[in-house]
Image: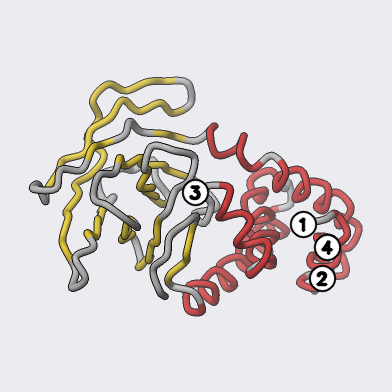
Amino acid sequence: MTYGEIKTMIKEYLHRDDLLAYIPTWVKWVHSFVQKNKIFRYQQCEFDPVTLDENKNEYDLYSDFTFGGVTTKCKKIGHILIEKVADGTRVCELTKKEYPYFEEAFRKIMNGNTDYPVIYTRWQNKIRIMPAGTSDYRMLLLGYRELPFYSNDSDSDYLSEYYPQLLVIGALAYAAPFIKDKQDAEYWQAIYKDHYQMYLQEESVILRGQANVPK
């Protein structure tokens, strides 16, 4: 999104005259955030790939976990159940109840190149993922403290095109801890919460990369 598009959108969702003076600052912040999204993602927590076995349907997931510069060895981060749905596609589900650092948990199915063909559906604290193609995939778990809809660059492109308001408001919600006025911060967090719920209702399944699976 361009600087002008972001500014227009913030003004559209801003209903407090006392915050109008902050628009230029917020527009710059969001624009910078969108441009540097990839850098932000990799500053969050990443986990080692897990190879999915065709004949195995249950995994405990462990990984060395780095958070705030501190590495914890062999931390159990969850339990994965693999099941086959009617069309033979395997669905992976992770429950993140054991891991207190997470606001959300995301998994990506990788096929060894730069494309991540994957479909996911999200319900409450569970995320179900369907890999597109063969079952020989590596799985990378990415955790985010904020902005749960970011998992790769194509997500940002998708949201920019179809849900730009969520992208902008989400960025402002993420900025909330840095906004000194508590009321201002809560304002953007509340708007983000409302719009994220609408987003989930409208689009429970998102196509990513080369995935060719119908909604």
**Up/down of 104 relative to 213, above or below:** above
- Disc 2 versus disc 3: distance between alpha carbons? 32 Å
Q: 104 left or right of 188?
A: left
Q: Which of the two discs, 2 and 3, labels the residue nearer the N terminus?
A: 2
Quick one: 100 or 113, which is closer to the camera?
113
Residue 76 horizontal/vertical position (percent): 22, 35
- Disc 1 versus disc 4: distance between alpha carbons? 6 Å
Quick one: 141 or 182, which is closer to the camera?
141
Residue 112 horizontal/vertical position (percent): 38, 37
The kind of residue tagged 4 is Glu
Marks 2 & 4, CB-CB < 8 Å contact: no
**Up/down of 99 relative to 72, above or below:** below
Marks 1 & 4, CB-CB < 8 Å contact: yes
Residue holding disc 2: 16
Q: 48 left or right of 10?
A: left
Q: Which of the two discs, 4 and 3, labels the residue nearer the N terminus?
A: 4
- Disc 2 versus disc 4: distance between alpha carbons? 20 Å
**Up/down of 75 relative to 190, above or below:** above
The kind of residue tagged 2 is Arg
Please identify the quarter of the rendering in which residue 70 is found: top left
Residue 30 horizontal/vertical position (percent): 75, 50
Residue holding disc 1: 1
- Disc 1 versus disc 3: distance between alpha carbons? 18 Å
Q: Which of the two discs, 2 and 4, labels the residue nearer the N terminus?
A: 4
Please identify the quarter of the rendering in which residue 170 is found: bottom right
Q: Say what secondary structure mark 3 lies in.
A: loop
Identify which residue is drawn at 80% across, 52% down. 26
Residue holding disc 4: 5
Please identify the quarter of the rendering in which residue 184 is found: bottom right
